[in-house]
Image (tube, grey):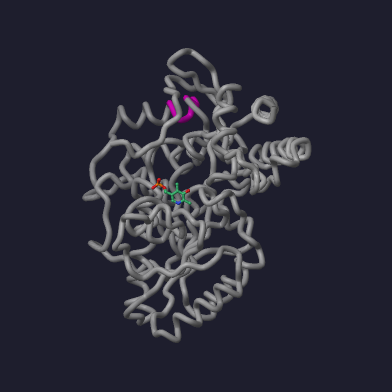
Amino acid sequence: MTTYGRFPLALERGLGCRVWDTEGREYLDFVAGIATCTLGHAHPALVAAVTQQIQTLHHVSNLYYIPQQGELAKWLVEHSCADRAFFCNSGAEANEGAIKLARKYAHTVLNISDPVIITAHASFHGRTLAAITATGQPKYQKNFNPLVPGFHYVPYNDLAALEAAIAELDSQERRVAAILLEPLQGEGGVNPGDVAYFQRIREICDQTGILLMLDEVQVGMGRSGKLWGYENLGIEPDVFTSAKGLGGGIPIGALLCKTFCDVFEAGDHASTFGGNPFVCGVSLSVCHTLEQENLLANVQARGEQLRAGLEAIAQRYPTLLAEVRGWGLINGLVLQPEVALTAGDIVKAAMAEGLLLVPAGPKVLRWVPPLIVSEAEVNLALQAVERAIASLSI
Ligand SMILES: *Cc1c(COP(=O)(O)O)cnc(C)c1O
């Protein structure tokens, strides 16, 4: 089906942060499968884990215990605020699980018969029906009505609007069961969460029993320079979801929560492929490599280097570029609102200069390279984007 608007490019091979197209042209890959290939391409640890697991046992179903699934769950709970994990295949599916968990928690613990989940404008939570409903962007919902009931939207990082929404819903006797937010909005334009906003939400949730659920699908697993996006906000969620970087490019998603809100019982939720030996074995190799190669330190250093370089470029092109924002290795180069050029135009020009980038909306250029990216590669990418911008500005 023609669901994707594609660039005229077919990639054939990758190594580290570089990929080659079918014509043999080389590109620096600052898309990383959209914030997914944390270890880049053909990383020896990933190759070894894939090979070892496929030769041993790749899939059996959740009718039986799966040691790799247990080990991955153990690593995740030991390295996060969560106590329990459920595995699935994607970010949307992880968020579906979070929505079901919040509803069951509302019915069985909070005693809410018509629960509402609050999400943010400009958010992105995936493409299944409940996930597009949670996604506060009309362009993803258009023509797919009727949407799933039980969602309410507020502007991101706006505390007064959130407090007003909770009060309004309470007065209609449609009580709030959960607040679902990204710690940093990725797809919606690389908008970092505000620390004071999230800290106050944590207090509200503690006082009211509302669940705080964070979508860590894009920003989690080290991309922000901390393992989880919420660590940048000084709070802990009750529930969070992961996918994208969790598998380093193999399809896996996870729903994680604290014990008190793990209301799922046997039969409540399932996924045929979810948490199979193959994906869990490979994901564990990603987790271990993050630690062994001390990648969080690299993410912080390369992120600072990248932002400083982009800020210098923004100063040289002030009529075109407005600002640079982000955490670690998820950064946005924001275009001036009034210029006719779009982020897509710069992406195309950068491609001609041997650099792959992805937009986050029409006016933001998203920078999400592999977490293994080197100082020299960041410099090459900065030079390439500046050549691209210069070619467009003439
Ligand atoms: C990509 C993304 C999703 C959807 O993940 P899929 O694996 O495509 O279903 C959900 N939430 C956020 C924040 C994302 O960036």
Q: Is residue 346 magenta?
A: no
Determine the residue positioned at 42% across, 32% down.
6
Viewer-side residue, 336 vs 33: 336
Q: Is residue 162 above or below residue 273?
A: below
| Residue 327 shown left or right of residue 248 in the figure | right
Q: Locate residue 114 relative to residue 37 in the image: left or right.
A: left
Residue at image position (28%, 36%) is: 1
Residue 194 position within the rendered picture, expressed as x and y whole percent measured from the top left: 64, 61
The answer to whether residue 363 is left or right of residue 124 is right
Nearer the observer, 112 or 317: 317
**Displayed quadrant of residue 193:** bottom right
Image quadrant in which you'd find residue 27: top right
> Residue 324: percent from the left, percent from the top?
69, 45
Q: In which quadrant is the C terminus drawn?
A: top right
Q: Quadrant of residue 263?
A: bottom left
Main secondary structure found in the magenta portion: helix
Q: Nearer the viewer, residue 194 or 209?
A: 194
Q: Whole-percent x and y of residue 369? A: 57, 35
Residue extent of the magenta highlight: 42-47
Looking at the image, which residue is at 36% across and 55% down? 142
Would residue 324 appear left or right of 54 to someone viewing this image? right
